[in-house]
Image (spheres, rainbow, N blue to C red):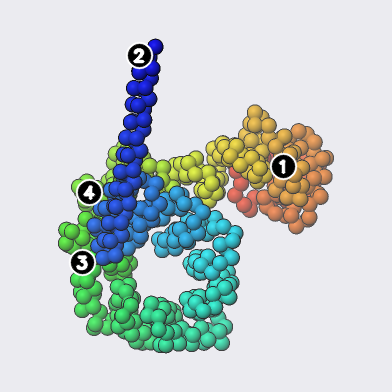
Amino acid sequence: MKMKKLLILIALTGIILLGGGYVGYRGYKVARQHRLVKQARMFVAKSDYRKALLVLQRAVKYNSKDVDACRLMADVADAMRSPAVLIWRSRVVELNPHSTPDRLALAQTALAVRDYTTATNALERVSADDKKKAPYHNVAGTVAVAANLLAEAETHFLEASRLEPQNAVHQLNLSVVRLHGTNAAMLAEARGALKSVSENTTNAALRCQALRELVVDAVRHNETNAALTLTKNLVGQTNSTFQDKILRLDLLRVTQKPEFKPMLATCQREAAEDPAKVQAMATWGMSKISPQDTLVWLTNLPASTQTNQPVPVLIADCYAVVKDWTGLQAYLATQRWGADLEFLRHAYLTRALKGRELTGAAKAEWELAVKTANNQKQALGMLLRMAAQWSWMSEGEELLWAIVNRFPEEKWAFSALSQVLFQGGRTRPLMQLYSQQVKRFPSDLSIQNNLAMTAMLLEAKELKPHDIARDVYAKASTNISYASTYAFSLHLQEKDAEALKILEALKPKDLENPSIAGYYGLILKSTGNSSKANTYLDLASKIRVLPEEKKLFDRAKTGA
């Protein structure tokens, strides 16, 4: 008995020691993590982003869910103009979904890379209380400007100004929006306000922004001499940026001034040691000079610059634009872009292999690209944008399926995929998509309605489409789409009199909607009103419909 108690005591002691050892190890990891993040902040404070990046890579390897480390990684990627910035901003929001500052930062980053879907989604999910605050309205207004929704942007900036009347940024933004208008008095007032800020404000950053907006306005109205004067003033400001020099450089190019070539050489020399400036210079050069000349410049940069993002991506992009597939493949073969961007390297390599018509190798490489994206939402989104840019329809559809399956809350992906399938006339996969979404969002009547319609067109009785159509109509009988689906259900059940009654309860204008008219014509034909039916069937022929719908309408029209 004593021996048994001794064994139990030894066992318990072991468990305690093991537990203590684990806690001690975990505590060591936490302390190590804090030291790495602190060290990274010190490098960031010194603008030594390369060393900060190396330290942060170790930190996120210790703990990939450390919000502070991920946020700092996003800041460093932003400073270096790395394409990974969107991935890190998105990861921070995934880890900290209720943080409005992180959502606003994601929206601004997405806007900078023209990912309007991510920007809009980030703003939509800001809490109701924070949507009443000035920072939200300021960013929402900026996103609206990018989408050319100027009235909406003005509303946001007016509200931001009301909430923070002392904040000159909101007034400046309001003036910028009004510069896009046509009212002469308002234009003059906006220009006057920006001119006042550019001359009198004690805020150097705001002064520079006012000058930039005045330059853009002058260029928009072909006032090149005024624009040149303004850019000269701008680049002379203490808080001017390298992008301001690019702005002046482009004006010198357009006006064919003799200062252009010397300034071009100066800008290229200044950018050579700074990947962020290389990005600005290369982006401008590809669109304003030539991709080939830009590629030559990039590949002659110092080796230390060429190995830092975003330079490798820029070089790959130049190779792709000039369609030097052999050069692109050779360049990428020796590259490694790190865990965050390796999927992009595989995507560019796929482009090179496709360009060389090496179909099998390209397929394998694309599979690697998708696999390396590791089911990260922003990585898959970046691949999707590349597929769209290169007109890769099948790869784009594959990515949409992946996003829909992995991130069902991303409604834009569902909408995009359903549109792709509809445009391709692929009714069965469309039905499968709706069936899948109904399980995820059982209260969404629109998806239920679409499932019922596609299932009826394909005679998929196992999905009980008639029951679905009846239930959806019962819940929203004034919806013309739901009424049309239910009427079609009644028609298939040989209840044409009831079907006709459902549709004729709609407004005459609704019946002329081409998406409704075909079904109205079909039912009119079945009830013997052929002449009236053909009028509505003709309306349906003006829009794209699914193959099964076209067959139904054509048969009704010909009387077959």
CA distance for labels 3 and 4: 20 Å
Disc 1 marks which residue?
472
Q: Which numbered dot is residue 3?
A: 2
Q: Quarter-wise, where is residue 130 in the image?
A: bottom right
Q: Nearer the viewer, residue 403 or 33?
A: 33
Local SS, label 1: helix
**Residue marked by disc 3:** 272
Residue found at the far front of this picture: 2
Instruction: Give the label, 1 or 2, closer to the camera.
Output: 2
- Considering the image in quadrants, where does the N terminus appear? top left
- Give the CA separation, mark 1 to mark 2: 72 Å
Mark 1 or mark 4, earlier in chain = 4
Q: Residue at x 34, y 55 (%)?
A: 73
**First in residue order: circle 3 vs circle 1:** 3
Asked which secondary structure carries label 3, the reply is loop
How many numbered markers are drawn?
4
Looking at marks 2 and 4 on the same chain, the residue that comes earlier in the sequence is marked by 2
Q: Position of residue 459 (x, y in %)?
A: 65, 32
Classify 10 Å Cα crowding around label 2: few (below 14), some (14-19), many (20 and above): few
* Residue 335, numbered label: 4
Say what amino acid the circle numbered 2 marks.
Met
Q: Reply above or below: 489 against 244.
A: above
| Residue 326 spot, x, y in % from top left | 22, 49
Left-right relation of 223 to 427: left
Label drawn at residue 328? none
Dot 1 amino acid type: Val
Q: Which quarter of the image is occupied by the C terminus?
A: top right
Q: Residue at x 66, y 42 (%)?
A: 443
